Image (cartoon, helix red, strand yellow):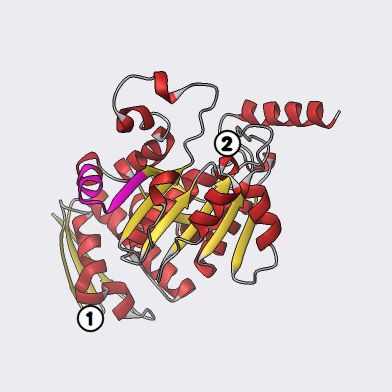
Amino acid sequence: MNQINLILDEVDLKLFYGEYNQNFNLLTNHFPKLKITGRDQNIKATGNEEDLLEFEKKVKSIVAYINRYNKLNEIALNGILHISKDINNVEKLEDVIVHGIGGKIIYAKTENLKKLVNCVDTHDMVFAIGPAGTGKTYTSVALAVRALKNKEVKRIVLTRPAVEAGESLGFLPGDLKEKLDPYLQPLYDALRDMISPEKLASYLEKGIIEIAPLAFMRGRTLDGAFVILDEAQNTTHLQMKMFLTRMGANAKFIITGDPGQIDLPKQQKSGLKEAMRILQGVKDIGFVKLTEIDVVRHRLVKKILEAYRKQEEE
């Protein structure tokens, strides 16, 4: 058996070990084959040479991160342990929103998505506007999950206006929930990437996470909730006004939509377009616009959107 002794000089030990040794326990649990002890500046680890070398690299990465940012939260530490192989790359951890299933790293992939993250951090209500495939809904759900994990909110509410895009819900089989679930599927898909099936089922059963059509929001006050209105271009004037006024204390609202994909009857105005015009001057409401440049799906999606845009301009 081999042994290494590391000395943590010139680093904030409170940040390294974490409150109640949470950071240190996370570090030691990541190396189950090593026997690791820590006391003040002295870290001792015993085990095989390969694991010890990897352990030493991780400790150096943690120290580098603390010295650079003067902080260390669980998200950053998990990022260092699972993805950062080079201490020169620790700054990339700032883009990590949440760690999903199987260690999947969910982060802001484009500059405008980073703007969305920053805007949500500084505003209680944010409009995220852009075409399909730009990651606005997925990123918004990730931000909601992060807020729930960090206990910044008590629950998540995800909603969509139940506009029938070329199909009639009335002719679909099943009860109301079975009719609506396929329409709300993109929201379920995003959550399944970020929360284990067992925990997600428990959250849904307890109402900690709620996924429902917009009509179900009427008459409610949403306190302590992270609320996302998806496909908001398909809201009417009354629906949008109703939704925006549901906002309660300690709540976060994100409204996502694509003004170029409206499924409403031609005689009805989009509540999203109207809200963007009316609320543009309200100081505490944030607006983030995404474009074809931000498309994070298959590369062909970007080309398809560009081709359609050119045709529509002609």
Instruction: Kindly give the residue lying farthest to the right in the view shown.
Output: 314
Q: From the viewer's perspective, is residue 23 above or below residue 167?
A: below
Give coordinates of residue 69: x percent, y percent: 47, 72
Is 208 magenta? The answer is yes
**Residue ID for mark 2:** 133
Q: How many marks?
A: 2
* Cα–Cα gap, marks 1 and 2: 49 Å
Residue 143 visible (yes or no): no
Q: Between disc 1 and disc 2, whose residue precedes?
A: 1
Quarter of the image where one finds residue 61? bottom left
Q: Could you classify mark 2 by the number of other residues whose Cα lies within 10 Å: few (under 14), some (14-19), or many (20 or more)?
A: some
At 28% across and 57% down in the image, what residue appears?
Answer: 55
- What's under tag 2, amino acid-wise? Gly
| Left or right of residue 88, residue 148 in this image | left
Give coordinates of residue 24: x percent, y percent: 23, 67
Q: From the viewer's perspective, is residue 6 above or below residue 58?
A: below
- Name the image quarter holding the C terminus: top right
**Residue ID for mark 1:** 40
Is 222 magenta? The answer is no
Residue 147 visible (yes or no): yes
Q: Depth check: 270 or 289 in front?
A: 270
| Left or right of residue 287, residue 312 in this image | right
At 59% across and 55% down in the image, what residue appears?
Answer: 127
At 31% across and 33% down in the image, what residue appears?
Answer: 177
Give coordinates of residue 98: x percent, y percent: 39, 53
Q: From the viewer's perspective, is residue 167 above or below residue 20?
A: above
Give coordinates of residue 45: x percent, y percent: 19, 63
The magenta region covers 201-211
> Which is in the foreground here, disc 1 or disc 2?
2
Q: Could you classify mark 1 by the number of other residues whose Cα lies within 10 Å: few (under 14), some (14-19), or many (20 or more)?
A: few
| Left or right of residue 81, residue 169 in this image | right
